[in-house]
Image: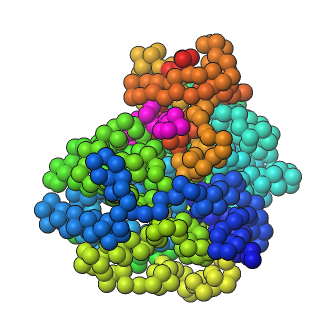
Amino acid sequence: MAQTFKSACPLNCWDSCGFHVTVEDGKVTKVDGDPDHPITKGKICGRGRMLENRTNSPERLLHPLKKVDGEFVSISWEQALHDISLKMKELKETAGTTSILHSHDYANGGLLTNLDQRFFNCYGGVTELVGSICWGAGIEAQSSDFGDAYSHAPEDILNSRHIVVWGRNVARTNMHLYQRLQEAKKQGAKLYVIDPIFNATAKMADHYFSIKPGMDGWLAAGIMKEMLRLGLEDRSFIDTYSVGFEDLNELLESVTLEEIAEKTEVPAEVMTELAAVYGDRPVSTFFGLGMQRYENGGNTIRLMDALIAVSGNIGIPGGGANYANRQVGQSFDAAALTLPERKTAFRQFTMMRQAEGILTAKDPEIKMIFVTCGNPLTQVPDSSRVREAFASVETVVVMEQFMTDTAEMADYVLPVATVFEQEDVYYSSMYHHYVNHGPKLAEPPGEAKPDLWVWTELAKRLGFGADFDFTRDEFISLGLGSLKEQGITLDSLRNSHHMELPVDTVPWADRQFKTPSGKYEFTSFRKGSESRLTLALPRETKWTDKERAEQFPFTLLTIHPLRSNHSQHYHLLKPEPKAKVEIADNIAEKLGLQENDHVKVWNDRGEMKGFVHIMKKAHPDTINIDEGIWAKFGGPVNHLTSSRESDNGLGSTLYDCLVNIEKV
């Protein structure tokens, strides 16, 4: 008999949806939206629905695997755990615990995904990854300006007079914000979209502005110049609640509007128009994640923050520099789960340059890689280098549900459970501030096990089993411990299914910032030294590397796919996916390319092939290839991207990428 249960989406996504999951005879048969969820209200995307296919796929890994003479063979859990723990004991004694790299990403949410850190901390501390391929430069940038990265609550958009969606196709990546935009427009708000690609969000805008990729900070500077010329700035906020404005003003005076228009390929009159918009408060701005994926990415976000501060749209209803909402994740007691005090050794690589770290590490060398919650062979930039690095290591262990590109490189693959096969709580650190409960609804197939079981069994064999001698309920309750006074407990979540976290729905309303000065910092002193804004350019442009731009004249973007959460769903798509190369119409005209032509896209880092789709109204000389596609389907696009870090060291430069293209 079929039963329907309330559950939640684990995917690393803006929306963190509530689910209705149908279970029949112990098997998940349908995933739908929960109409009672206060934010997602019964609407979910295809990526969420596909979690049923993911759970029931015949391609699921069912048994532990070991590579023997280049081929995988099934082994028992006992043998897998014995081999891995023995290797870890040996490395701890001979090379030190930092000879192990924990390579992780954020494919799925869930409070108990933090337990991998607990395991490695209790082991003694390993080489860890810092920064983020996805949003790291922007987080660091807003931490410099505000002291942290906070966003307004979803319903606050209805207080906005104007809404600017900058570099973010919410129709694809944040569908419930898209619905809020429709609602706000009906109430009279004006919508402006700034993006190199005329996307589905741009189609509903009152005004769409095309911009050259990587030049968003320059556009923000141009708008600020016009605001100051027209006297539209908020002098009260600047004089009372900020520091460093003089440095910003000096920077703006060092460049002409004509030079900004040339760099951005945005007419000067658009900057004048947007200056008037930002001066007509309240204005809410929603940032995408792509604009900080350049070498100048941190500075770009800081200039955009500065525009919002100069215009007085900080700390007011209907305003905000809405990039991320870290106060959501900060609601939980992560330290109680991860036990950071237990590690006695420590080393870091940035997530972007983990391949270089692996290949060059000394004292100790990297002898073992443990991969959780990620697919670095597809997702980490400069894929050829990543493959070389992983192949150089003695032992690679991957915890997975499917034979991904990374799993194929492993020596041991450990099959793990999906969202519906274990209980956890889920939340988003990017959009709304509700925590959702996800019950266990089915048993894992074959010998697949929850991550917690794997960590517990390994901990026993490594001598710190007592640190994992807790039930799943107890671990979840540890993470919720900081919320107990607000009535948020595991029992209350089981009863309510979703609960509102205690966050500021209008951040910085008290004008108390988490910066060293306690004020908004146009010039940041966060790390003990003065950090001024600049008018920096991406690394790969005709202004910074003319010879490269002549050889590779087109800008490559690698946006998030519509039907897969990063690389997670490609192997489940029907019909089987093929690489799509989306090009601006001026490229098609210049090179004589037609729809569905087979083409090669290349630069000095690598190449990939795919089939042409001509974009309408895309910024000239722009190409997009969605990220995440597996090698067997023509990818990954990261053969073309650079592993360089952003200007502040904590973000990727995935979009700072010039390429060429030809028909094959």
Nearer the observer, 632 or 652: 632
Q: Is 633 included in the stretch rendered in magenta?
A: yes
| Horizontal and vertical percent position of residue 616 | 72, 27
Residue in the picture at 30% in, 68% down: 79
Q: Can you tell which quarter of the image residue 597 is in?
A: top right
| Horizontal and vertical percent position of residue 206 | 80, 40
Looking at the image, is 441 positioned above or below residue 388? below
Magenta residues span 631-646
Image check: 299 left or right of 581? left
Tell me the quarter of the image containing the N terminus. Answer: bottom right
| Horizontal and vertical percent position of residue 92 | 18, 66
The chief SS type of the magenta part is loop
Looking at the image, is 407 positioned above or below residue 608? below
Nearer the observer, 7 or 185: 7
| Horizontal and vertical percent position of residue 222 | 60, 33
Tell me the quarter of the image containing the C terminus. Answer: top right
